[in-house]
Image: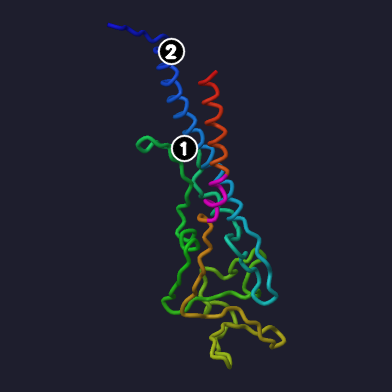
């Protein structure tokens, strides 16, 4: 009978066990850091700078951006930094509770009960908000409705000199294009998180082989 004895097996087993623990800890760290990175990019995409049209006033930014007016949409983003383990994998996410954010992500059409009103520059605040929000057009002193030669319905007022000032275009529905903000941020962040992961794994494996 030939016998064989393996030396150092216990030490190898301990190293492998520690490597597993360290890799799990590294994956959790990557998930946490990745979510914080995603939130940073989302904040940037929700802080888009629009333009200004002489007639329509403040306009929305183009591309995968949403204009920031009050900053509340950005503030209501989940903070990130919380990793949860599902099975053998760590996951962390960042989202928004706002229905209008989800709506702008994929786009869609809003139908009015009667009419939706689109404010011109004359009916906007400096920040681009409807200065008569929550107020009926009929309660605006001197306001009246008329149809243009093109058949569009407008709300207007006349100034002291009798010059007409258009306040709102009234429409049955408004269709918004999908901006794909979250999808764009995901594409931006994925290679960055992958690089973080590669760096973490190299550190852990180097320590295990040391």
**Image location of residue 50, percent across then percent down:** 65, 64
**Image location of residue 122, percent across then percent down:** 65, 75
Q: Considering the numbered disc 1 on the image, is that residue within a helix, a strand or a loop?
A: loop
**Image location of residue 138, percent across then percent down:** 52, 80
Q: Label 1: which residue?
A: 82
The residue drawn where x is 61% and y is 65% is 62
Q: Residue 107 colored magenta?
A: no
> Outermost residue, bottom direction?
149
Based on the displayed image, in which of its 4 quarters is residue 88 positioned? top left
User: In which quadrant will I find the N terminus?
Assistant: top left
Q: Label 2: which residue?
A: 11
What's the mark number on residue 134? none
Q: CA distance from mark 2 to mark 1?
A: 34 Å
Q: Nearer the viewer, residue 32 or 89?
A: 89
Q: Is residue 201 above or below residue 58?
A: above
The residue drawn where x is 65% and y is 68% is 58
Q: Considering the numbered disc 2 on the image, is that residue within a helix, a strand or a loop?
A: helix
């Amino acid at each position: 009978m030939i016998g064989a004895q393996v030396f150092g097996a216990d030490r190898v087993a301990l190293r492998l066990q520690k490597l597993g623990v360290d890799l799990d800890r590294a994956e959790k760290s990557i998930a946490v850091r990745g979510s914080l990175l995603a939130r940073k990019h989302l904040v940037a995409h929700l802080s888009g700078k629009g333009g200004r049209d002489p007639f329509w006033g403040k306009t929305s930014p183009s591309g995968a951006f949403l204009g920031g007016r009050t900053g509340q949409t950005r503030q209501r983003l989940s903070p990130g930094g919380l990793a949860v383990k599902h099975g053998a994998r760590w996951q962390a996410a960042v989202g928004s509770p706002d229905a209008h954010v989800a709506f702008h992500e994929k786009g869609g059409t809003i139908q009015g009960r009667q009419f939706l009103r689109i404010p011109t520059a004359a009916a906007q605040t400096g920040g681009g908000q409807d200065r008569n929000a929550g107020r009926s057009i009929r309660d605006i002193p001197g306001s009246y409705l008329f149809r243009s030669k093109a058949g569009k319905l407008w709300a207007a007022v006349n100034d002291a000199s009798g010059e007409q000032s258009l306040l709102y275009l009234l429409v049955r529905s408004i269709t918004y294009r999908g901006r794909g903000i979250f999808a764009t941020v995901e594409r931006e962040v994925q290679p960055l998180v992958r690089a973080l992961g590669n760096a973490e794994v190299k550190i852990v494996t180097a320590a295990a082989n040391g």
